[in-house]
Image (spheres, rainbow, N blue to C red):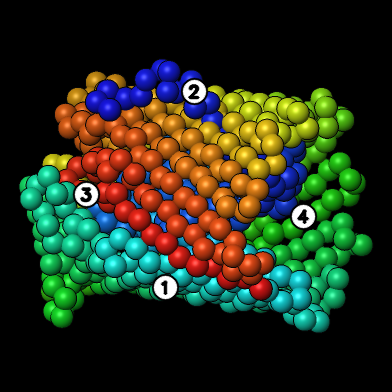
Amino acid sequence: MKSGLSLVALLAATPALAQDDDIVVTASGIEQPRDQVGQAITVIDADTIRTRQAVEVTDLLATTPGVRFNRNGTIGTVTGVSLRGAESSQTLVLIDGVKVNDPSGDADSFNFGNLLVGNIRRIEVLRGSNSVVHGSQAIGGVVNVMTGTPAEGYAANASVDYGYSDTLNAKADVSGTSGIASGGVGVAYFRTDGISAAARSFGATEKDGYKNITANAKLKLSFSDALSLDLRGYYIHADLDYDSFFGTPADSPDITKSDQYVGYAGLNLSLLDGKLTNRAAVTWFRHDRDYYPARGADASYGYSGTNLRFEYQGVYAPVDRAKLVFGYEHERPDYDFYGFGSTASAKANIDSVYALAIVQPAEGLSVTGGLRHGDHNQFGGATTFGANANYTPNHGATNFRVSYGEGFKAPSLYQLYDRWVGNADLRPERSKSYDIGFDQSLDNGRAMLSVTAFRRDTRNQIDGFPPTYVYYNIARARAKGVEASLTLRPVEALTFTAAYSYIDARNRSEGTANEGNRLPRRAANAVSVSADYVWPFGLSTGATVTMMGDIFDDAANTRRLDGYAVVGLRASLPVTENLEIYGRIDNLSNEEYATAYGYGVYGRSAYGGVRVRF
């Protein structure tokens, strides 16, 4: 695919959202029916996650409209996710309610490379600026990742699979409810010899291995109908061989080890006969990264990023058709660096208040609007506004949506103070995001079509690309386009989904050398098509085709990377009520492509395993 995707392919693939769930939480921070939300949200549910057999969260995200990603080679390497053409650092990421964007990471972004599917049971993807509810980083949108809800009584799941390049993937979880307590724990282990992170086309042959251990835990104590305590934890340890190169891609013996810690402790209190609910929580995130010139050597340098947050949220519902969501947040990101004979550290303090009203002034109409004011100890105060509306004339079968959102993101501590690429003169990023769309259910829910048109204008967008890599502000950037999705279930045994998005993301800084250029690593066109069929004797078979158009790897648009199409096949067969065997083939056609210049991707590979549940 040299020049993008054909019009025939695009039209044939008109699109898919996983819309089996009627309740979402990411739009307003509280549970809401879909037909009360005016923003574009995709839900990837537990059934989809299990059926697709994906290992990396990005493989699931890539099949949703408006999502682009790039990876520096093998599994576990640095991976960024862009929503609607925004910078990957403008994607806010939550794990079980905790903000996990790394203050010591590249541009305060979250590295999806170490986020494997493991025991994740649900992902919500909100597209469009939403700083009122979620604060900084939510310029492109929000990826909300959730582990499973504890089962009533007792439940346990386990699976293990093995395949290409000595890859072992195992996971298990157990959960239950007893008296006032409900909770669960899970652990996942992944190991592979991998492939060369540097592309084979440059003569790289050394395999870069990867190991990942992930653990999660939840405990809820319901002291009464009005009072409960939530405790949650998530941990990731990763050990990666990677290729570090400047200039011509080549093998190198570099190693990185990282540990990520996520913690949440929240108290929930209901007052006024349930009309006023309160949540007070402390969340903590820490990411330690150490880099070694070779295995067995001492670390050359390393980073540590910490974010301690206090959150209060109140929800007052005086009548059935009106809710007021309000809150206060204090956030303290810390950045630490060591290496090459020096150390550096920095911290910030951010205080925010917000209020959001959700009202249904007429039958079928839901309107939401709110404000957030944040005060950054270095950049001062900033106020953002957001509003959206959803109208359904037929009890949810048809939904007309419109939304407007503002975004604000102060430069990260890494962007400001990193020894090599930091720039203390950076200015905060600002955005305005608009979208309008509709959802249409047909044939009693057997078909669901969604279409959304969007535009986002960003001022002072921060970028950092060759030759200097030093961060700088782009005066203006604009992204506009359309997203479409389609889900079909003509018979109970067959599920067909598809997603298409067109994104025109460009530098709009007048008078600059890159004015009018496409922003790097953002394909204009993307299509994903999936189909799964359950045969009468229980066998489930499925396939996913993902197609991406051409991208430019640099801001000057001088280095083009060709588009690609990747095909994956999968199958599973229940042996007994509690035992299932499964397998998949990734990249069936052995397509050679790149999402970032000089880095390799997996060719054709096969895996098989067994799954048990109780």
> How many numbered marks have been drawn onto this rendered protein structure?
4
Q: Position of residue 406 (x, y in %)?
A: 54, 37
> For the residues carrying marks 1 and 2, which lies nearer the camera in this image?
2
Distance CA(mark 2)–CA(mark 3): 30 Å
Distance CA(mark 4)–CA(mark 1): 39 Å
Could you tell me which secondary element the residue under label 2 belongs to?
Answer: helix
Could you tell me which secondary element the residue under label 1 belongs to?
Answer: strand
Distance CA(mark 1)–CA(mark 2): 39 Å
Taking the spot 73% from the left edge, 27% from the top edge, the residue there is 442
> For the residues carrying marks 3 and 4, which lies nearer the camera in this image?
3
Q: Where is residue 101 in the image (x, y as percent from the top left)?
A: 44, 58
Query: Disc 1 marks which amino acid?
Result: Tyr
Q: Which of marks 2 and 4 is nearer the N terminus?
A: 2
User: Which corner quadrant of the image does residue 57 belong to?
Assistant: bottom left
Badges 2 and 3: C-beta atoms under 8 Å apart? Answer: no
Q: How crowded is mark 1: few (under 14 residues within 10 Å), some or many (20 or more)?
A: some
Q: Position of residue 200 (x, y in %)?
A: 14, 49
Q: Name the residue under label 3.
A: 600
Q: Which of marks 2 and 3 is nearer the N terminus?
A: 2
Distance CA(mark 3)–CA(mark 4): 49 Å
339 and 583: which one is in front? 583
Query: Disc 4 marks which amino acid?
Result: Val
**571 relative to 37, above or below:** below
Distance CA(mark 1)–CA(mark 3): 24 Å
Q: Where is residue 472 in the image (x, y as percent from the top left)?
A: 26, 41
The answer to whether any part of residue 127 appears in the image is no
Judged left or right of residue 281, residue 570 is: left
Query: Disc 3 marks which amino acid?
Result: Gly
Q: Mark 4 points at which residue?
A: 315
Q: Earlier in the sequence, mark 4 or mark 1?
A: 1
Q: Mark 1 points at which residue?
A: 189
**510 relative to 283, above or below:** above
